[in-house]
Amino acid sequence: MLPKTINPGNFSNRNEFINQANDDFMTTVCDKDIREKFNGKFIYVDARDWVEDKLDIFWHIAGLEEDDQITIYPCSNDPIMLLCGRNCNTREWVVETRTKSKAVCLYRAARVTWINAILKHVNSNNSCVKVWIERGRTFIRYENGLDDFVIILEKMSKNPNMYKLVTAYPVFFISQKRNFDKQYLRYVSSENSIKK
């Protein structure tokens, strides 16, 4: 079971909401004393770059890229839609991160506390979690009912006993769901052929 998402009814505007999401991110993901490990290895969160008083990686997690084509709103059946104003299409609220322009997505931001919860699930071998490696990155995907979320880690080149958090987000594009399914099946198939 994952933690409840942030209730948009508790906020009068989206700035208050995003500030709460950032506070939750700082508490549950950035605090190294609280943050779960992956397979017993420390997960590094880059805290060097700040944009608009928030970590660059927070905006990466809480934002959509410019080339993301939204045909169905991920928040269609979620009360968060009342606060966001369909920013994924209007792009009225865009943040310039270190590497990309990101349209702020409250649907994604509302789920930042899932990162640590999913790491707990993977460490307990929960059947809702799939783990695979693709192009040198470790993908951790949680699927249960309507919840579909991925965490992407990279091994630290200077310290193989550490991972770096690359990003994490809810998976709502059908093409991405299919792509992740294919990657996982390919990985499992290659792992099984190696074991034979």
Image (spheres, rainbow, N blue to C red):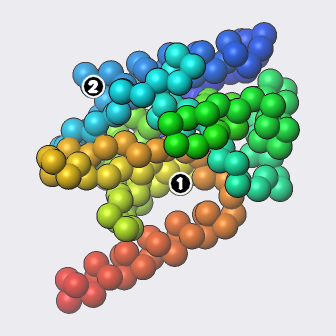
Q: Which residue position holds label 2?
A: 32
Question: Which residue type does callout 2 highlight?
Answer: Lys
Q: Mark 1 points at which residue?
A: 143
Q: Where is residue 133 in the image (x, y as percent from the top left)?
A: 35, 65
Callout 1: SS: strand
Above or below 82: residue 108: below
Is residue 135 rendered to the left or right of residue 176? left
Q: Is residue 126 above or below residue 3?
A: below
Choose top left, top right, bottom left or bottom right for residue 121: top left
Q: Residue at x 36, y 27 (%)?
A: 48
Residue in front for this viewpoint, 33 or 136 = 136
Q: Nearer the viewer, mark 1 or mark 2?
A: 2
Q: Pinpoint residue 66: horizontal percent, then vertical percent.
A: 70, 48
Instruction: Tell whether 150 sits left or right of 76.
Output: left
Q: Name the residue: 41% across, 46% down.
A: 166
Q: Is residue 25 visible?
A: no
The 10 Å Cα crowd at callout 1, few under 14, some 14 to 19, many 20 or more, is: some
Residue 110: assigned label: none
Give the Cα distance between marks 1 and 2. Answer: 26 Å
Mark 2 surroundings within 10 Å by alpha-carbon count, few (fewer than 14), some (14 through 19), many (20 or more)? some
- The answer to whether residue 24 is seen in the rendering is yes
For mark 2, give the secondary structure.
loop
Q: Residue at x 54, y 39 (%)?
A: 60
Please identify the quadrant where the C terminus is shown. Answer: bottom left
Residue 98 position, x and y percent, is 50, 36
Asked if the residue at tag 2 contacts the one at tag 1, i.e. Cβ–Cβ closer than 8 Å, the answer is no
Pick whichever of labels 1 and 2 is earlier in the sequence: 2
